[in-house]
C-alpha cells in the first residue's frame, strides 16, 4: 500500500505484576480482534491500592494499526 | 476476570440545558451498543451560541468499558 | 461569506449559582458589544470561597465570533 | 499580614447530582479541618457509571487557603 | 435530531506530498465506513525520512461524526 | 522604541484550499484594522467535512503586533 | 456589581533589565487604555540575545480586568 | 459513606531496581500514616545517574485516599 | 537512608518586590514546620494589580522534602 | 543493530512558501552533518509578518536519527 | 564549580525486555561520548508491535550532564 | 541567507542570586562554543534548598542559534 492509513484505539491493560505486563495484556487482547497492529504509546499509568500495596497496575495506551483499503 | 482490560471511546454529548445533561445523554447513547460501561472523564466543554445564549452545551468525554475475553 | 474569519475573546464570567450560569452571563455580556457570536470553549473553572461554601463560580471561556469583511 | 502565604490541597469530591455539588462537598469537608479557605480550581471531572447513568460525579479540585505565620 | 451525539475516531493519514493530502486521505478512508462525518482536528504531525527528504507525512487527526439514535 | 510592547489577538482563518491559505487570510484581515503586525503562531488546526472531503480548513492563530506608546 | 465579568487581554512586555520590569511595563501600558485591571498571569518568558547576553526579556502575560455593565 | 471524599498527596518514591519498586516504596511509606489508600497515578519518572548507570529511579506519584467524615 | 522518599507540598508565596522574593518567603514559611526541604519547582506566576502596577507577585511552587522512615 | 538508539535534535526551518518546505529545508540541512535520519515531529509552527503577509514560515521540529555503536 | 551549567540531550533507547532496560541502554550509550551525566527524565514511552507482542520498547528521555567551563 | 535555519539546544543555568542571572550564565556559556545565538525561551524554573533558603536557582532554557550553510 503506497500511502498507508492507521487507526488508533485506546485501551487500559491491567496487571498485578508490572507496567510492561499490563501493556502486553492490552496488546494481546487487541490482537484478537484487530489485524496489522503496528505501534503503541503509553498515555497514563495508574493503579489501585489494597493493603498498602499496588493491586493492579492500570496502563492506558493507544495502539495504532494499519487499516485495509 | 483476574486482570480486566478496558477500552475507551470518545463521544461528544450535547444538551440545551446543562453540562451534566450532555454527559448523561452521551453515556445513555453509549450504553445502547456497549456493555460494562465503568467510568468517564470529561475532555472538553464547548458549545454553540444563538441569540446571545448557549444553544447547545457540547461536552466531549471518554468512556471506559470492560472488554470481554 | 465564502471563507469566514473569526476572532476569539477571552472572558471570565462569575455566578453564585452554577458553572452554566457563569458561562451564560459572560456570553450575554459579550453579545452587548459583539455581533455574530458563534461558539465558546471553557478554559478554566475556578471560584472563591466564603464561610466554607463557593461564593462565586469563576469560569474563563473563549468566545468565537465572525468578523465582517 | 503584609505578604500572605497560601497552601494548596487537592481533593476529590463526589456527588450523585452535579459537578457543583461535588465541589461544594469537597470544600465543606476541607473547611472542617482547615481555616481561611480562599479559592479553588477544578483539575479534573470524572465519574463512574452504573446502569447506563452517572452514579458519582468525581471532581478533583485544588483548594487554596492562607497559612498563618 | 434535537440533541445530536457525536463519536470521535483517531486516524493517521499519510502522504508523500503534503499535510493537507494526508488529512484528506484519512478522511476519505473514514468516509468509506462511517456516515455523517462532521469535523476533524489535527493532533500531531510527524513523518519518516529517507535520503534526506520527507518520505511520508504522517498526520494524526480526530474525526467527529454524528451517531444515529 | 526602546522597550516595545506587543499585543496578541487570536483569530481563526478559514480556507477551502490549504492551511497556509487560512493563515494568510486571517493575517490579511487583521492587517485591515491593526498596524505593526510582527509574528503569528498556530494554535490549532481543525476543519469541517462535507461529502467525505475537507470543506474548510479552520486554523486558529495568535497574531502579535507592536502597540504604540 | 453582584456578579462581575472580566476580560483577559494578552500582551508581551519587554525589558533590558528583568522579568519583573517587563511585566510592569506591559501592565503600565495596558492601564493607559483599560480600567479596572485586576490580575495577571505569566504565559511565557522568552528573550532575544545579542553579543552573548540577553538583550530584551520578552514576557507574555494575560491581564484580567473587570468590564462594566 | 454515600458520597465519599478523597484527598490526594504527592510523593516521590526512589529505588535502585525499577519503576514499579519506586512506586511500591512510596505507597508503603504512605500507608504508615494514612488510611484508606485507594489509587495512585504516576506524574513523572526521573532518576539520577552514577557511573553511566541509573542510580535511583525517582517516580513522582499522586496517591488518593478516602477521608473520613 | 538507602532509598529516600520525598513528599511534595504546593504553596503560593507572595511579595511586593520580586518573583524570587515570593519564592523565598514560601520556602521560609515551609521550613518552619517541615524538615529536610530539598528542592522546589515553580508551577505558576501570577499577581494582582493596583493602580496600574503589580501589587503582589503570587508564585505557586511545589516544594519537595525527604520524609523520615 | 539489535536494540538501536536514537538521538533527537531540534531545528527550526524557515520558508517563504509553505510549512512543508520549511520542514524539508530543516531536514536537508540536518542531513548534511548527520547520518541515519529516521523521523521528525513538528513541535511548533510560527512565522513573521511583513506588509500584511507571511514573510517566513518558521517550523520547529524534532528530528530523530540512529546513533552508531 | 560554584554555579554549574548543565546541557540536556534527548535520546530514545530501545529494548526487547523492559522500560528500565531501554533507559539504561540510552544512558550507557550517552556515557560513551559525554562526561558528568547527572540525571534523566522520561519524556515518552512507545513501542512497536510484532505478532501481537511488544517487539521494542522505545523510551525517549532527556539526559542532563554538567558542562565544563 | 534567504531562508535561515536554526538549531535549539537545551541548557540549565544555575545561580545563587536570581532567575535572570541563571539565564545569563547559561547563555554566556553557550556563546563560548556556539555562534549566532538569537533567542531563548524558559522551559522550567526549579532550585535546590539549603537551610530554609534557595541555594541555587536552576533555570532550564532553550537557546536558538542560526546554523551556517
Image (cartoon, coloured by chain):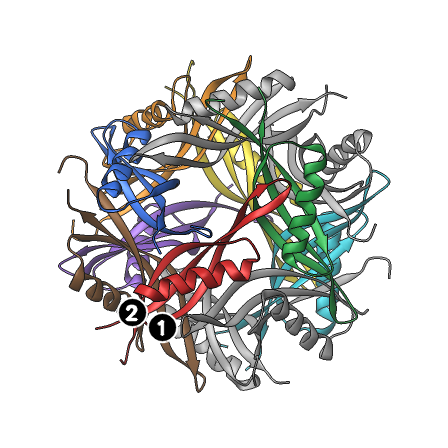
Chain colours: B green, D red, F cyan, H blue, I brown, J yellow, K orange, L purple
Residue linked to disc 1 = I57
| Residue at (58% x, 42% y) in the render | D49
Which of the chains bears the disc numbered 1? I
Task: Count how many numbered circles sit on residues in the image.
Answer: 2
Residues tagged by mark 1 and mark 2 found on one chain of the structure: yes
| Residue at (65% x, 45% y) in the render | J19
**On screen, residue J11 above or below J51:** above
Residue B61, x across and y down, in percent: 62, 46
**On screen, residue F36 above or below J14:** below
Observer-nearest of I13 and F53: I13
Q: Secondary structure at mark 2?
A: helix
Residue linked to disc 2 = I22
Q: Secondary structure at mark 1?
A: strand
Residue J44, x across and y down, in percent: 56, 48
**On screen, residue H18 above or below H29:** above
The answer to whether marks 1 and 2 mark residues whose Cβ atoms lie closer than 8 Å is: yes
Residue F21, x across and y down, in percent: 75, 52
Distance from the alpha carbon under mark 1 to that under mark 2: 7 Å
| Residue at (46% x, 51% y) in the render | H2
Amino acid at each position: 500500500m503506497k500511502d498507508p492509513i492507521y487507526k488508533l484505539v485506546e485501551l487500559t491493560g491491567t496487571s498485578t505484576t508490572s507496567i510492561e505486563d499490563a501493556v502486553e495484556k492490552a496488546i494481546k487482547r487487541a490482537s484478537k480482534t484487530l489485524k496489522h497492529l503496528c505501534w503503541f504509546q503509553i498515555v497514563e499509568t495508574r493503579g489501585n491500592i489494597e493493603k498498602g500495596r499496588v493491586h493492579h497496575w492500570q496502563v492506558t495506551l493507544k495502539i495504532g494499526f494499519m487499516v485495509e483499503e
